[in-house]
């Protein structure tokens, strides 16, 4: 009986911890080539999607390697966002930056953005560094964008812990029944 009570307490603690935890969603992207006129630089497009809770004045920043990107241009964005672009500078060694600032509070909304650019690399562009920030401009999360096709959900560690504890409790109960 003690083991069952202990497991139920552990389970409820984990459920409460998971429900109060807010994990930031990693922005995903899909790269596509834009048909170029003969003799012109290679233009490409990154289509981004992110689903997270943003408060008005908060948002996120995308960083573009100065050795691979030039001529950044946001071509598609929701009216609920304000974006600013700082171009990469290969001569000064400064990466390009695009800031997206939420103009209204948003929860559970999928946001889509498109960025066109001149690509200086040889293969398709890879992930970009990003940072989430709140209305006070405090960084609340960071990481690398993920390709749209490579997103495979992973179970949270706490869920695996609870599942393992439940399996262990079930195994112990089976062993006790056999002993009787």
Image (cartoon, rainbow, N blue to C red):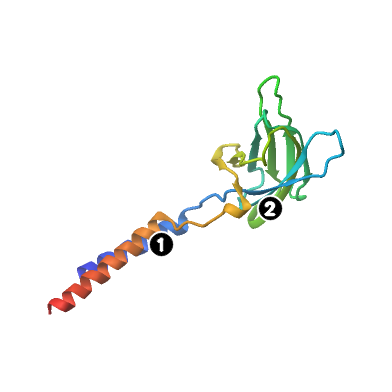
Q: Position of residue 146 (x, y in %)?
A: 59, 47
For the N terminus, the quadrant is bottom left
Relative side of 20 to 138, left or right: left
Q: How many marks?
A: 2
Q: Are marks 2 and 1 in contact (CB under 8 Å)?
A: no
In whole angstroms, how far apart are the C-alphas of marks 2 and 1? 28 Å
- For the point 18% across and 73% down, which residue is it? 175
- For the point 71% across and 52% down, which residue is it? 112
Relative side of 3 to 40, left or right: left
Q: Position of residue 91 (x, y in %)?
A: 71, 20
Relative side of 171 to 116, left or right: left
The residue singled out by tag 2 in the image is 111
Check disc 1 and report its element: helix, strand or loop: helix
Q: Is residue 87 above or below residue 28?
A: above
Check disc 2 and report its element: helix, strand or loop: strand
Relative side of 160 to 21, left or right: left
Q: Earlier in the sequence, mark 2 or mark 1?
A: 1
Q: Mark 2 or mark 1, which is nearer to you? A: 2
User: In which image quadrant can residue 68 be found?
Assistant: top right
Q: Nearer the viewer, residue 17 or 24?
A: 24
For the C terminus, the quadrant is bottom left
Q: Position of residue 129 (x, y in %)?
A: 59, 38
On residue 60, the disc is none
- For the point 56% across and 54% down, which residue is it? 151
Q: Is residue 34 above or below residue 169?
A: above
């Amino acid at each position: 009986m003690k083991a069952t009570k202990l497991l139920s307490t552990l389970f409820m603690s984990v459920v409460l911890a998971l429900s109060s935890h807010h994990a930031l969603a990693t922005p995903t992207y899909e790269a596509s080539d834009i048909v170029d006129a003969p003799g012109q630089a290679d233009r490409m497009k990154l289509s981004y999607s992110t689903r997270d809770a943003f408060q008005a004045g908060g948002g996120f920043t995308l960083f573009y390697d100065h050795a691979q990107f030039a001529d950044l241009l946001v071509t598609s964005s929701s009216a609920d966002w304000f974006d600013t672009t700082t171009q990469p500078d290969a001569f000064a060694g400064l990466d390009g930056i695009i800031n997206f600032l939420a103009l209204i509070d948003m929860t559970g909304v999928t946001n889509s953005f498109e960025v066109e650019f001149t690509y200086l690399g040889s293969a398709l562009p890879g992930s970009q560094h990003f940072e989430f920030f709140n209305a006070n401009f405090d960084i609340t999360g960071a990481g690398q964008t993920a390709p749209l096709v490579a997103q495979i959900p992973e179970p949270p560690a706490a869920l695996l812990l609870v599942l393992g504890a439940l399996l262990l409790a079930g195994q112990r109960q089976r062993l006790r029944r056999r002993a009787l």
